[in-house]
Amino acid sequence: MKAVYKRRVQFYETDAQGVVHHSNYFRYFEEARGELLRTLGYPYSKLREEGYDVILLEARCQFKKPIYYDEVVNIETKLMHMDRFTFSFEYLLLVDGQIRAIGSTRHCVINKRRVVSVPQGVRELFTKIGL
């Protein structure tokens, strides 16, 4: 299963040529990931209330074609891997069905500044919906 998060590019996210600045792609990934968790009923705020934080270990992006101011971007987010301690997402950024960028992130979970197993609630949720 994949989740789709839709957003419109704001002017402040662009450079002098009206192209989305490369640093914003990683913000888009974070927004999409957060929305996925929220949609599944397990928002990041709930994880924090339970004493967990999600740590970014790695982030990558392949820039295929520019994204411009005022375009609507659909960000498809899919869990690609989960083991006891880490999980990874893949992101496709599409405008009018055309792939503009492909990204991925890898994460772990900490509690009291120590790496811990992915919480059972998160693990069950991802497994239940087929991610």
Image (spheres, rainbow, N blue to C red):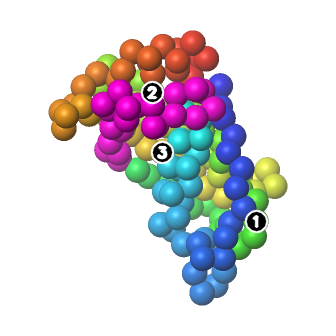
Q: Earlier in the sequence, mark 2 or mark 3?
A: 2
Which residue is drawn at the image coordinates 48% and 45% (left, top)? 104
Residue 26: % across, % down? 49, 57
Q: Which residue: 68% across, 66% down?
A: 9
Q: Secondary structure at mark 3?
A: strand
Residue appearing at x 67%, y 45% in the figure: 5
Whether 40 is among the magenta residues is: yes
Which of discs 1 and 3 lies nearer the camera? The answer is: 1
Mark toward the start of the polypeptide (2 vs 1): 1
Mark 2, residue position: 81
Quarter placement of the C terminus:
top right
First to last magenta residue range: 38-58
Numbered mark located on residue 104 in the image: 3
Secondary structure of residue under mark 2? strand
Marks 2 & 1, CB-CB < 8 Å contact = no
Does the rendering let one see residue 107?
yes
Compared across the picture, whether 37 is left or right of 17 comes to left
Give neighbour class at mark 2: few <14, some 14-19, many 20+ (Cα, 10 Å). few
Amino acid type at circle 2 is His
